[in-house]
Image: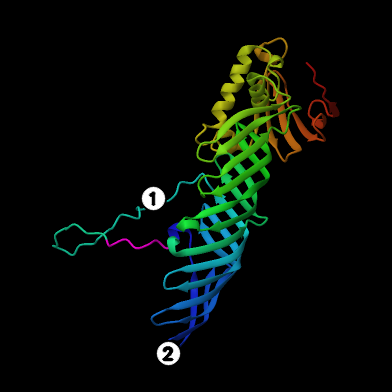
């Protein structure tokens, strides 16, 4: 099924038949650089029964451009005339999931397509009598370990996911339970790449409705400010966050511009900066598609000096290299040359800054805030 990214090749089958007994000596498929193998036995006749052991080794289970999953593990499958049982454990060796891509259009399950012969008249097609679904007859208990290299991207999120899920079928319905946690993640909001400090995705049944608890903060400022995402995945609540608590305007100013509102100069400068960030960062529907993202930049700041004159305006562009390292280029409109800055955040209030340009220096910055 290439539309879903499933492609198994080079199949080999060795099956021995002896009366009503069948032995699956070997069934092998190649998937990517790995493989999946199955062995088992079956009894045919009026009360058929089969038992199969499946082993995956570095199997490319999904190979779409937006979904790539390589997994290993094993499962036991027991099939009888009236029920199916599946029990196993798998680990994702490598995964890349892009949730910004739309799913491929496909027909609903209740749509039947009939190809008519030339000259034939179209007639109504009566659907076949519905049989009990496969899940209604299935007893599934699968444990899925996300491993150490499953990355989720899209809709502003870029993170590794770790944890374990338990997939079952109570009352014939698919259920997923478990808790996933983010690792080394970032979340793009208001034109900034925020570092995810707390990221929990909890599944309590339905696959499409996990509970979110995410805290992402801006890493390159001397106050703790960011966004909190909580609630169901279908309708999450997003709010501004700061520690200590401050007004919504102060939170937004620190989050978007990296400074307090009273330190920005004239009001028109703040409006200009916010408008520029909103334009360059892209809209909410595509937070990763703005100009800043395409240029590989994380920050754009426009500020005027104390005089408030246009010639004293300073433009700064920056790139966050990691949670502690960042680099920036700053230049005044009236200056002959700009300056490069390499910044290392040792702690929340302690920063080292190396500057090269008209003036080269190494600064040790200690910040203390009070009301």
Q: Which residue is mark 2?
A: 19
Of residues 295 and 92, the one drawn nearer to the viewer in this rendering? 92
Tell me: 342 left or right of 299: right
The residue shown at (61%, 45%) is 201
Element assignment for label 1:
loop
Of residues 51 and 234, the one drawn nearer to the viewer in this rendering? 51
Which span of residues is magenta-colored?
Answer: 128-134
Q: Is residue 1 visible?
A: no
Q: Position of residue 19 (x, y in %)?
A: 42, 90
- 287 is within the stretch colored magenta: no
Q: Which residue is mark 1?
A: 105
The residue shown at (83%, 29%) is 360
CA distance separating discs 1 and 2: 46 Å
Tell me: 179 left or right of 220: left
- 132 is within the stretch colored magenta: yes
Seen in the picture, residue 77 relative to 166 is either above or below; the reply is: below
């Amino acid at each position: 099924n290439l539309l879903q990214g499933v492609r198994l090749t080079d199949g080999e089958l060795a099956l021995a038949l002896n009366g009503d007994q069948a032995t699956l000596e070997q069934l092998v498929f190649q998937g990517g650089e790995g493989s999946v193998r199955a062995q088992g036995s079956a009894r045919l006749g009026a009360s058929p029964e089969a038992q199969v052991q499946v082993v995956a080794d570095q199997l490319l289970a999904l190979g779409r451009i937006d979904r790539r999953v390589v997994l290993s593990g094993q499962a036991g499958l027991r099939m009888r005339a009236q029920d199916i049982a599946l029990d196993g454990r798998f680990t994702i060796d490598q995964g890349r999931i892009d949730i910004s891509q739309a799913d491929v259009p496909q027909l609903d399950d209740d749509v039947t397509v009939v190809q008519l012969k030339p000259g034939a008249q179209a007639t109504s097609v009566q659907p076949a009598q519905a049989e009990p679904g496969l899940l209604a007859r299935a007893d599934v208990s699968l444990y899925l370990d996300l491993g150490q290299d499953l990355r989720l991207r899209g809709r502003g999120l870029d993170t590794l996911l770790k944890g374990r899920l338990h997939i079952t079928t109570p009352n014939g319905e698919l259920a997923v339970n478990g808790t996933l946690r983010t690792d080394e993640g970032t979340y793009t909001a208001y034109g900034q790449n925020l570092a995810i400090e707390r990221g929990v995705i909890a599944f309590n049944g339905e696959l499409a409705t996990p509970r979110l608890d995410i805290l992402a903060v801006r890493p390159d400022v001397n106050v703790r400010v960011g966004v909190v995402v909580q609630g169901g995945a279908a309708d999450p609540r997003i709010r501004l966050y700061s520690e200590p608590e401050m007004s919504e305007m102060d939170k937004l100013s620190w989050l978007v511009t990296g400074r307090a509102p009273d330190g920005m100069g004239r009001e028109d400068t703040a409006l200009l900066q916010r408008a520029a960030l909103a334009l360059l960062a892209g809209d909410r529907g595509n937070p990763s598609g703005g100009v800043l993202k395409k240029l590989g930049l994380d920050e754009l700041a426009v500020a005027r000096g104390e005089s408030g004159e246009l010639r004293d305006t300073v433009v700064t562009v920056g790139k966050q290299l990691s949670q502690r390292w960042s680099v920036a280029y700053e230049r005044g409109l009236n200056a002959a040359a700009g300056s490069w800055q390499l910044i290392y955040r040792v702690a929340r209030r302690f920063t080292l800054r190396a500057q090269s340009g008209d003036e080269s220096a190494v600064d040790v910055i200690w910040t203390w805030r009070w009301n």
